[in-house]
Amino acid sequence: MFKTNRVKILRIKEKKTQKELANDLNVSRDCIVSWENQRTTIPQDKIIKLAAYFGVTTDYLLGVEPARDSPGGSGNRSSAEPAQHIGV
């Protein structure tokens, strides 16, 4: 199980309904509800799809990486993306 419910947090942040997310991932709304309420474990293939869908790493979804807003958090930027530099 996940340490925190990052699927729900990301879904709400992206202003998606459970039904919209379910349709986009080709699963039932009940499946999304079960994942968000941590009643069932998300299958590995769906973790990968969720990570790609929300633009985060699987480690972030699994709670291995710190939360985005915490110091040292990974944000929504993958390690392959260059950092944005402000002003020169």
Image (cartoon, rainbow, N blue to C red):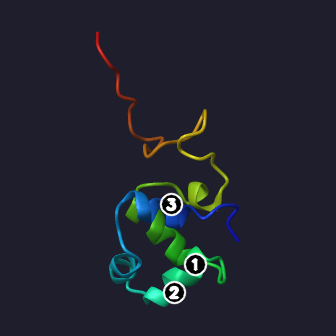
User: Which structural element holds mark 1?
Assistant: helix
Q: Which residue is mark 1?
A: 35
For label 3, the SS is helix
Do the residues bearing badges 1 and 3 touch, measured as CB atoms within 8 Å? no
Q: Which mark is residue 24?
A: none
- Residue 31 badge: 2
Per the image, label 2 sits on a secondary structure element best described as helix
Residue 79's x, y, as percent? 48, 41
Which corner quadrant holds the N terminus? bottom right
Q: Is residue 14 visible?
A: yes
Task: Quote the CA–CA distance across marks 1 and 3.
Answer: 12 Å
Question: At 36% from the left edge and 59% from the top edge, which residue is drawn?
Answer: 14
Residue sitting at x 63%, y 48%: 65
- Which circle marks residue 9 in the picture? 3
From what the image shows, is residue 48 above or below residue 54?
below
The spot of residue 84 in percent (x, y) is: 35, 28
Residue 12, quarter of picture = bottom left
The residue under the point 46% across, 60% down is: 10
C-alpha gap between disc 3 and disc 2? 16 Å
- Report x, y in % for residue 73: 57, 39
Question: Which of the two labelled residues, at mark 3 and mark 2, occupies the earlier sequence position?
Answer: 3
Dot 2 amino acid type: Cys
Q: Is label 3 or label 2 in front?
A: 3
Examine the rendered structure and indicate whether residue 1 appears above or below residue 78: below
Which of the two labelled residues, at mark 1 and mark 3, occupies the earlier sequence position? 3
Neighbor class of circle 2 (other Cα within 10 Å; few <14, some 14-19, many 20+) is some
Q: Amino acid at mark 1?
A: Trp
| Most distant residue in the top direction | 88
* Position of the C terminus by quadrant: top left
Residue positioned 53% across, 82% down in the render: 33
**Are the two marked residues, 3 and 2, in contact with CB atoms closer than 8 angstroms?**
no
69 left or right of 29 in image: right
